[in-house]
Image: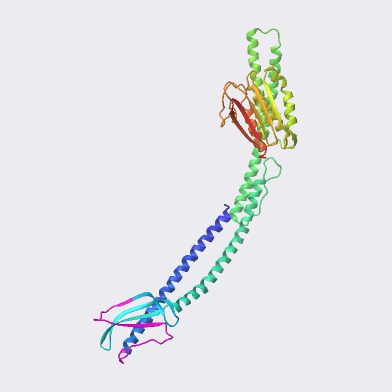
Amino acid sequence: MKLFSKYNRILILISFVGLLVIGLLFYQMLIFYLNRQLDHDMVEEVMEVKEYSVKGKFYTPHEFEDLVVQYKPIEKVRSYSQYGDTLFYNSLKHQNEHARFLRTEMMLDGEPYQITVIASKMERQEQIKNICLIILLPVCILLIVVLLVNRMLLKKIWDPFSQMLKNINDFNINHDKPYRSVDMPVEEFKQLNQVLIDLSGKVKKDYEEIKLFTENASHEMMTPLAVINSRLDNMLQSSNLDTKEGEMLSELYQATSRLTRLNQSLLLLVKIDHNLLQEHEDIDLCQLIQEKTHYFHELLQERSIQLKTTLLPSRIIANRQLIEILINNLFSNVIRHNYEKGSIEIYLDSNQIIFANTAHHGALDAEKIFDRFYKGIASEGTGLGLAILKQICIRQHYLLNYTYQHNLHTFIITFNNQ
């Protein structure tokens, strides 16, 4: 839920509950004062009854008055007055009405009587309802107007903040465009906007420095590694080496070759992480896999690995260099970790590509297999091949999964997430 919507809902809820509570309290206060007024009027009626009885007659209210006076003979007069609410039948209106009663005892014309005065509340209740409507209706209208004005003001205040969020989302560290500033009417938002301007500038500057350092370091490392490989290659071809020296030079040659591959893989990861490969084009995956199959054909034949392919038409819009690296890594992985006379299965359709292979060992840790420098048992690779695979899928918005079924290590890349 957005902050603006949440604030409005809370404000409306509090206003509604507050209005309801105030309305109920106001209504109860009016009822309280109505009862006090009726009690006072009934006391006056009792006084009139007492005065009227001096003349030797019983007092009877006028027909137009919503009053009823009842007389009941009793044996002895007790000094008390009882007030309460009741329901009585109005003979003039021919309906039951809510009323207030006063019950007391006194001597009338020398005889003890219980006097009950009943006063109808119908007219007063109608007055209370009208008063409540007259007061609460404008209050409700005023509340609605306040809420609407508050909503418009808040929207006007928060619009620059929404624009600032949009600018943050649009900001790309790889582009030359700096973070776009937003004119903020609120002082706190101005401070936040200035912090974002300073932070984006610092991040972009740090990124450029790290990018430049990585590229320079990688290129500087490639030169001495190429020289070492060249010299080791020349020394290995020399006829003056004995067996022990040849073995040592061979180990050094393998180590430097591995270091070269590691450097190239790290440089590639840096480029993928920094999204430096952005050009996209239409790629025929079926044709690309067929080309890679032909490229790895000799290596498959050398190890007598059986390859089974099911390639349906499939085209995607992506960076060709990244997709070629992805296919190469998949092929290298299923061949390197296979055994002699093993098997590889490749399936391709418009939504996904699947590489499955046999191997000496069972299932790998699905949670760690794509981590950098994670290697399976007896692996001689750099531990970056599958990490590169994962980063490419992340950049291209593909879904990458690993499963182990029917003694096959299976890698599934789903394209319909892009």
Instruction: Classify 404 as above or below 130.
Output: above
At x 43%, y 72%, the residue is: 29
Residue 204 placement (x, y as % from top left): 66, 41
Q: Quadrant of residue 67?
A: bottom left
Q: Kindly report the secondary structure that dominates the magenta region of the rendered protein.
A: loop
**Foreground of the two, 231 or 311:** 311
Viewer can see residue 400: yes
Q: Which residues are magenta?
A: 53-82
Q: Is residue 181 left or right of residue 404?
A: right
**Foreground of the two, 71 or 129:** 71
Residue 226 placement (x, y as % from top left): 70, 21
Residue 322 placement (x, y as % from top left): 70, 32
Viewer can see residue 216: no
Position of the C terminus by quadrant: top right
Q: Is residue 27 left or right of residue 113?
A: right
Find the residue positioned furthest to the left: 76
Q: Is residue 342 magenta?
A: no
Q: Quadrant of residue 349?
A: top right
**Foreground of the two, 68 or 378:** 68
